[in-house]
Structures are given as C-alpha cells and as structure tokens.
Image: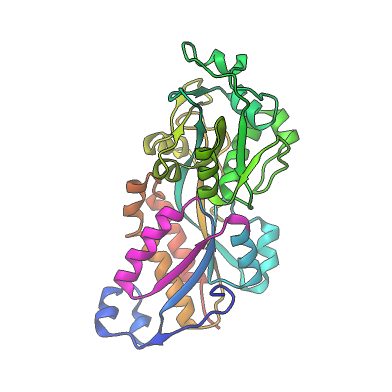
Amino acid sequence: MILSTRTLRRAVVTSAMATAFAFSPILSAIAQVEELNGAGATFPAPLYQRYFAEFRNQSGITVNYQAVGSGAGIRQVIAGTVDFGGSDAAMTDAQIADVGDRGVILVPTAGGAVAVVFNLPGVNDLRLSREALTGIFSGQITRWNDDVIAAANPGVSLPDLPIRPVVRADGSGTTFIFTNHLSAIDPYFRGRVGTGTAPNWSINEIRGRGNPGVASQVARTRGGIGYVELAFAEQNNLTYAAIENRAGEYITPSLEATEAALSSLEFPDNFRVFVDDPTEGYPIAGLTWIMIYKQYESAEMAEAVKQMVRWVLTDGQTLNNSLDYTRIPEPVVQRVLAIVDREVTGP
C-alpha cells in the first residue's frame, strides 16, 4: 500500500530546477525526493488535486494524496505512515503529543463552506432556520412539512415526506465543521449529538463515505438532506439550502459569504482556530490544515516538504478562489512559512 510502504526515488537536481526554486538554495547541493505521500480530509480534495498537479508540473515532485477523511489522516500522521496529513479538525494537543519527538506543525491552507444539500421533489429554493436545521439533525423534526420548516418558507409547497438525514460514515472534518456550528447554536443538539469528527448520531440516518458518498446518497434519496463541502455540491449538481445566520439573514454558501464569515478570525501561534457562530456571512464554514512533521528522516525529505508547503501558501493560494475556497491571509502565510523554514529539519 502506497501509504505504508513508501519508496523514495531520488534524482540529482538540475540547474534549471535550482533556478526555478531559488528560495531553497540547498536543492542545488543535495538530491531531491521525487515523491511525497499524504492522506486525510476530503473537504479540500478538489483544491488539493489542483495544487498537487500544478506543483508537480513546476517542481517535478509527485504528491500522492488519498482523500480518506480527516480522522484517518490524523491517525496516519500519528502512526507515521504518511509524509503529511490533511484535516479540517486541527489536531488536538493530545493527538500531537501522540506523535512523539517528531512533532507536528499545523499549516492552514484554505477556508471553505459546508453546504446543506437536499433532494425534495418540487422544491428548488429552501430556507432553513437555526431551529429547523438543528431540529432535523438532532431528530426532533422528522417530516418535511413540519411547521418549523414551513414558517421560513411561505408559499413553498413542502411535501409530506419523511426527512432522511445523510451523514458521514467515516471520521470527518466536514462533520466537525458542521456539528461545531450546530452545537454552538443549540444546547439540545450539543447534548444529544455533540461536536466531533464522528459524533453520536442517533437519528435513523443514512451514511455515506467521504463528501462524494454523502453527495451520492442525497442525490439518490427522495427526501434526503446532508452536508458536503460546497465544491462537491456543485460538482454533483445538488440543490443546497439557504441557512439562517446569527443576524437572522438567510444565506446560501458562496465564496463571498464564506469570506465574510471568516473575516474576523484571529490565528493563534499554533494556527488552530475554529468558526462557531459568525456574526455575518454564511455560518457553516471552517478552515482546513496540512499537518507536517518537524523532524523528517532525511534532509532531502524535510526540504521537499518545505518546498511543497511554500508553494501551497504562495502560488497555490491563487487557485483557491477559483474553486470557492478562501485564501489564507498574507500575514498568516508569512508567520507559517517562518515557522516551517525554521523548525522543519532532517536528522
């Protein structure tokens, strides 16, 4: 398996490569790793596919990324079976401690929205209040023509159908972002379901693996409703709801509305920050991180990872908006790069 049996192929760096990556003079003096392996979050998978294709074209380094979910990504970082991981639920201090002496740096790469997608015959425009959204996913609201849903949708003919919630089958950062918001706005949801990558669902739910699995289940389920990263909703032509935010406005997910929700975030020294209940914009939003080690088995591997991170946070950021992800603010980028350049090393 590629993640657990890694083969590193090295080649002498040409003068052209050294020129292309002048920010890393060491590359002209040592061999270069040709392959990096990572695994984790599905939330940024459409963006990471673009990142790593472009990065390979410019650097000659192949980055294999398996979108297996944030929970699996964190587990593989702890086990040491990948060169880096991806997660939308930043590793906790306890999880980082489990890595041991190698250490971990959390590198924020993008922000994005979680869309609430639905499959409701005859209904294309749906508004979900805070009460309706938490009621559906805590099992208190079970039919589409419930008065709570109808109150926010005057003039809409809501069918008398059972609601079929679709949730993630795997440990998921998308689930963390979704449940983090619902827990912030409703004590009942917080007590019954809670916040996490794999919370205590008990709502007669349907489960799908990864964002693609949830999108597929909603698409084929009459009366289905679920949550996926915005790019997956658009790629699968799913209809998504307008969600009530803290200001009482009904907002559909978009790049602009996500940027508004994330605009007030302040990044601490470890870059771990979450969106609970933003005062403006689309309310179900969050960040995603690449998790890299501080200590690698060779100077070549450390340099390749630093090169990847630098590209993602500079050239790579120009791709974010085209896929409806927000960019990481430039002052934060500079802080991250300084830490990575200083602390990521070989033996």
In the displayed structure, does residue 264 sit left or right of residue 293?
left
> Where on the picture, by quarter, is residue 334?
bottom left
| In the foreground, 311 or 83 | 83
In the displayed structure, does residue 70 sit left or right of residue 204?
left
| Vertical position of residue 333 compared to residue 5: above or below | above
Q: Quadrant of the C terminus?
A: bottom right
Residue 231: image location, x then y, percent: 42, 45
| In the foreground, 62 or 333 | 62
| In the foreground, 278 or 67 | 67
Q: Which residues are magenta?
A: 43-71
> Where on the picture, by quarter, is residue 293?
bottom right
Q: Is residue 59 magenta?
A: yes
Residue displayed at 36% across by 87% down: 29
Residue 335: image location, x then y, percent: 45, 58
In the displayed structure, does residue 191 sit left or right of residue 60?
right
Q: Is residue 318 magenta?
A: no
Residue 151: image location, x then y, percent: 55, 13
| Vertical position of residue 276 compared to residue 305: above or below | above
| Vertical position of residue 194 compared to residue 55: above or below | above
